[in-house]
């Protein structure tokens, strides 16, 4: 995956690329004295030649990761307008689309998706009615990537210990069968 980091004159900019786990693989931006340019985020099996024009390659130990670019701004209409050029230059795209020229996106033209209505509870990102439909893609990713499989296995073990085992403890039965006295 190729990513571009534009030249930033006014607003601080940083980005991190994270594989599953605690260690960032790429730290880009003003605080790291990063030069504007093209950065390649490569998976564990990539062993190709670095194309001319790529500023730096970051090799990720997994096939899955998380990239979090941020541009800081004052919450004023003037600053919101001023950072648009910086935002346009932040992109990620497959290496096959790299042509050595800065690609831009007008992010302000994305469709607006309203936020869920606020309530007294946390936003639910795993929806029970979609869980089964999306589970296949998650399991396929786990089969293809040992790190994802390990993270899922550890999550299942933790859930079994913390959620399922207590269901079988006699002292908790009254909690789960409210109104029934033994």
Image (tube, grey):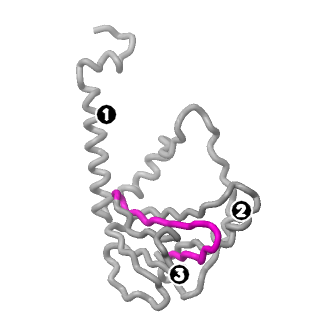
- Identify the residue position indicated by label 1 in the image: 163
* Distance between the alpha carbons at the discs numbered 3 and 2: 24 Å
User: Which one is in front in this view, the residue at disc 3 or the one at disc 1?
Assistant: 3
Q: Are dots 3 and 1 in contact, CB under 8 Å?
A: no
* CA distance separating discs 3 and 1: 47 Å
Q: Nearer the viewer, mark 1 or mark 2?
A: 2
Residue at mark 3: 37
State the SS at label 1.
helix
Q: Name the residue under label 2.
A: 79
Side of 95 relative to 58 (left or right): right
Residue at 34% over, 67% down? 62
Q: Quadrant of the C terminus?
A: top left
Label tally: 3
Q: Which of marks 3 and 2 is in front?
A: 2
Query: Which of the two discs, 3 and 1, labels the residue nearer the N terminus?
Result: 3
Label 3 residue SS: strand
Assess disc 1: are there few (<14), some (14-19) or many (≥20) residues with their C-alpha within 10 Å of its C-alpha.
few
Cβ–Cβ below 8 Å for labels 3 and 2? no
Specify start and end residues of the magenta stretch as a single range.
Answer: 3-22
Residue located 50% across and 66% down the image: 15
């Amino acid at each position: 995956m190729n990513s571009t980091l534009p030249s930033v004159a006014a607003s601080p900019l940083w980005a991190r690329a994270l594989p599953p786990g605690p260690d960032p693989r790429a730290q880009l931006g003003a605080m790291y004295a990063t030069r504007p340019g093209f950065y390649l985020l490569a998976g564990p099996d990539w062993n190709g030649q670095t194309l001319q024009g790529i500023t730096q390659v970051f090799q990720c130990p997994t096939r899955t990761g998380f990239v979090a670019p941020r541009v800081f701004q004052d919450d004023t209409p003037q600053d919101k307008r001023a950072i648009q050029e910086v935002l346009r230059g932040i992109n990620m795209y497959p290496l096959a689309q790299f042509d050595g020229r800065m690609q831009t996106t007008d992010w302000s033209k994305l469709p607006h998706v309203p936020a869920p209505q606020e309530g007294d509870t946390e936003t639910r990102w795993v929806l029970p009615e979609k869980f089964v439909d999306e589970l296949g893609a998650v399991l396929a990713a786990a089969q293809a990537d040992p790190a994802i499989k390990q993270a899922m296995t550890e999550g299942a073990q933790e859930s079994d210990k913390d959620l399922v085992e207590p269901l079988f403890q006699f002292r908790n039965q009254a909690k789960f069968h409210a109104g029934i006295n033994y």
